[in-house]
Image: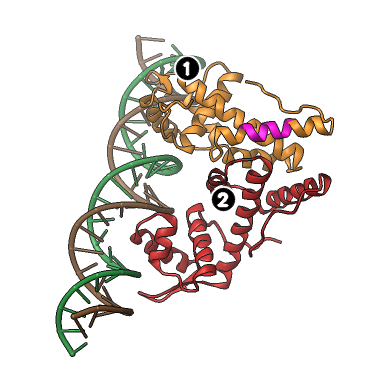
Chain colours: A red, B orange, C green, D brown
DNA sequence: TTCTTTTGTTAGTGTTAACTAACATGAAAA
DNA sequence: TTTTCATGTTAGTTAACACTAACAAAAGAA
């Protein structure tokens, strides 16, 4: 059952959500500057992205203050992060793609793969693990 | 050894090249209208894409006439098409993603995966084939 | 408390790529 | 040969996003 509410969010906005989630996990407080550094964009780009995300009820932030994900935003961000993790793991551990490349490509592909496909990939990897007795590598750091 | 000549072509332009290659393989003559239908965009979008690709020496076309890939354009298009085929095959045959979805997602991912990673995926699939005696499914229709 | 620095926002620009409307061209019909 | 119609192009608009420059606010130092 798919929610039609989280309609049409772009890859770029997904990147912002994911970055905010990651930052909030390691440094409770997330500021514009942090996101700016994390995504390698200038501060005005962050401000305007936040504005957009606010209008979609995915983040909340009072003027000149900290950025926080709404519950809805957190859900979306977590889904993307899971995609990232599964993809990264597959690329790095199964295909042997170098860490940096795997990270960069996972970052792109995560926006182009449906939840359904992602779960199939996840199952596939799990199956391979069992089949050839490999350790379960994927770290689900929520 | 990477050619630095095919510098920075966007996903969208890659889509155009790929579409032109596909069309030229089934109907020698490729017109703006064909590309327009294939990519689900309006004709002016095609015209302006062609203009861009012409400036990059990837296609040639005389005003009001047929569209053709240059050798360079054909090379690029074939690389993308190979990515598409490998990805599609993996998604459909190994992950069990429905045909339509697999096609759609391959179409997106093909722009975000390096040649190196693609080859690793291709080797991986080949390895799985041998390992579990599966038929080689990928149709390389050049 | 005032000054300075860091941080955040606004305003305005550029780029990519889509669209519509209107016009131009060339091929097929009359 | 002229009219018609499918096809192609130009011009102008819009949307998403990034950027710089300039301004506003908050936080820390003096």
Q: How many marks?
A: 2
In the image, what residue occupies the spot 43% across and 28% down? B6
Most prominent secondary structure in the magenta stretch? helix
Query: Which residue, given by chain and number where applicable, does mark 1 sit on?
Result: B71
What label does residue A111 carry, if any? 2
In the displayed structure, A13 sits above or below C24; it is below
Residue at mark 2 shares a chain with residue at mark 1: no
Mark 2 chain: A
Q: Secondary structure at mark 2?
A: loop
Quarter of image, res B56? top left
Describe residue A32's horizontal placement relative to residue B78 as left or right. left
Q: Position of residue A72 (x, y in %)?
A: 58, 69
In the image, what residue occupies the spot 54% across and 36% down? B114
In the displayed structure, A91 sits above or below C11; it is above
Quadrant containing the C terminus of chain B is: top right
Cα–Cα gap, marks 2 and 1: 32 Å
Q: Secondary structure at mark 1?
A: helix
Residue A76 can be seen, yes or no: yes
In the image, what residue occupies the spot 59% across and 50% down? A110
Q: Badge 2, how many Cα within 10 Å: few under 14, some, many 20+?
A: some
In the displayed structure, A4 sits above or below B69; it is below
The question of residue B121 being in magenta is answered with yes
Task: Write down the region rendered in magenta.
Answer: B119-126
């Amino acid at each position: 059952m798919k929610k039609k509410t989280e309609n049409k969010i772009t890859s770029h906005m997904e990147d912002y959500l994911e970055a905010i989630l990651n930052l909030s996990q390691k440094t409770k407080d997330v500021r514009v500057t942090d996101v700016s550094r994390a995504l390698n964009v200038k501060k005005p780009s962050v401000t305007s992205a936040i504005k957009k995300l606010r209008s979609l009820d995915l983040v909340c932030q009072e003027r000149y203050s900290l950025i926080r994900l709404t519950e809805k935003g957190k859900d979306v961000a977590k889904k993307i992060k899971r995609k990232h993790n599964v993809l990264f793991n597959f690329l790095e551990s199964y295909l042997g793609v170098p860490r940096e490349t795997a990270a960069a490509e996972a970052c792109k592909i995560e926006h182009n793969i449906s939840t359904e496909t992602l779960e199939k990939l996840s199952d596939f990897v799990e199956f391979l693990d069992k089949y050839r007795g490999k350790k379960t590598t994927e770290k689900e750091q929520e």
